[in-house]
Image: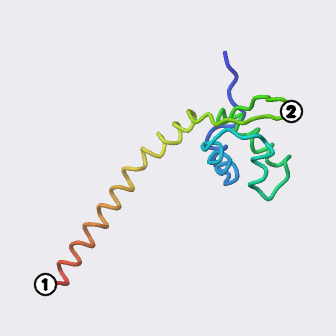
C-alpha cells in the first residue's frame, strides 16, 4: 500500500511560486538550474518548492547525469478541478443574475 502524500495538492498549489513552477513544467521538462533562472531566490529555495510539489505527486524528478530533470505529473490537479467545478454553478448563477439585471436595467432606462 502506498504511503499518503506529505502535502496534498491544495497545499501544493496554494503558493504562487509553486503554481509558476507547474506552469513552467507544463511547457517542457526542466532541470533545477533552468527552473531557478525564473525566480529571484536560491536554488535551495526552488528545490524546497519542488519537494513539496513532488510530495503532492505533481512533479517527478529523474537523474540525468549530474542534473535532476523535473517533469509535470498533472493528474492530481483533477482533484482541484473537481472541487472548483462544484462551485462553478454558483459563479454561473451570479453571472446570469448580473446579466439579467443589466439587460432589464437597460430596457427600463430605454422606456
**Mark seen at residue 111:** 1
Q: In the image, 31: left or right of 22?
A: right
| Residue linked to disc 2 | 66
Q: In the image, 68: left or right of 8?
A: right
Instruction: Report helix, strand or loop for mark 2.
Output: loop
Dot 1 crowding, Cα within 10 Å, few <14, some 14–19, many 20+? few
| Picture quadrant of residue 64 | top right
Q: In the image, what residue occupies the spot 72% across and 41% down?
A: 30
**Mark 1 to mark 2: distance in Å?**
74 Å
Q: Height in image: 107 above or below 51?
A: below
Asked which colour scheme the image uses, the reply is rainbow
Between disc 1 and disc 2, the foreground one is 2
Q: In the image, 28: left or right of 68?
A: left
Q: In the image, 106: left or right of 66?
A: left
- Residue 111 spot, x, y in % from top left: 13, 84
Instruction: Report helix, strand or loop for mark 1.
Output: loop
Dot 2 crowding, Cα within 10 Å, few <14, some 14–19, many 20+? few
| Discs 1, 2 touching: Cβ within 8 Å | no
Q: Quadrant of the N terminus?
A: top right
- Residue 62 spot, x, y in % from top left: 75, 29
Work out whether mark 1 precedes mark 2 in sequence or the reverse, and give the earlier one.
Answer: 2
Q: Residue furthest left?
A: 111
Q: Residue furthest top?
A: 1
**Mark seen at residue 94:** none
Q: In the image, what residue occupies the spot 57% across and 34% down?
A: 76
Q: In the image, what residue occupies the spot 79% across and 50% down?
A: 36
Q: In the image, what residue occupies the spot 75% across and 47% down?
A: 35
Amino acid at each position: 500500500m502506498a504511503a499518503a502524500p506529505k502535502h496534498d495538492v491544495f497545499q501544493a498549489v496554494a503558493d504562487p511560486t509553486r503554481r509558476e513552477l507547474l506552469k513552467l513544467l507544463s511547457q517542457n521538462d526542466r532541470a533545477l538550474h533552468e527552473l531557478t533562472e525564473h525566480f529571484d531566490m536560491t536554488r535551495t529555495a526552488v528545490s524546497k518548492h519542488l519537494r513539496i510539489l513532488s510530495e503532492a505527486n505533481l512533479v517527478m524528478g529523474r537523474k540525468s547525469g549530474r542534473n535532476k530533470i523535473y517533469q509535470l505529473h498533472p493528474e492530481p490537479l483533477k482533484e482541484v478541478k473537481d472541487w472548483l467545478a462544484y462551485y462553478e454553478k454558483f459563479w454561473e448563477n451570479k453571472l446570469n443574475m448580473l446579466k439579467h439585471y443589466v439587460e432589464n436595467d437597460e430596457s427600463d432606462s430605454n422606456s
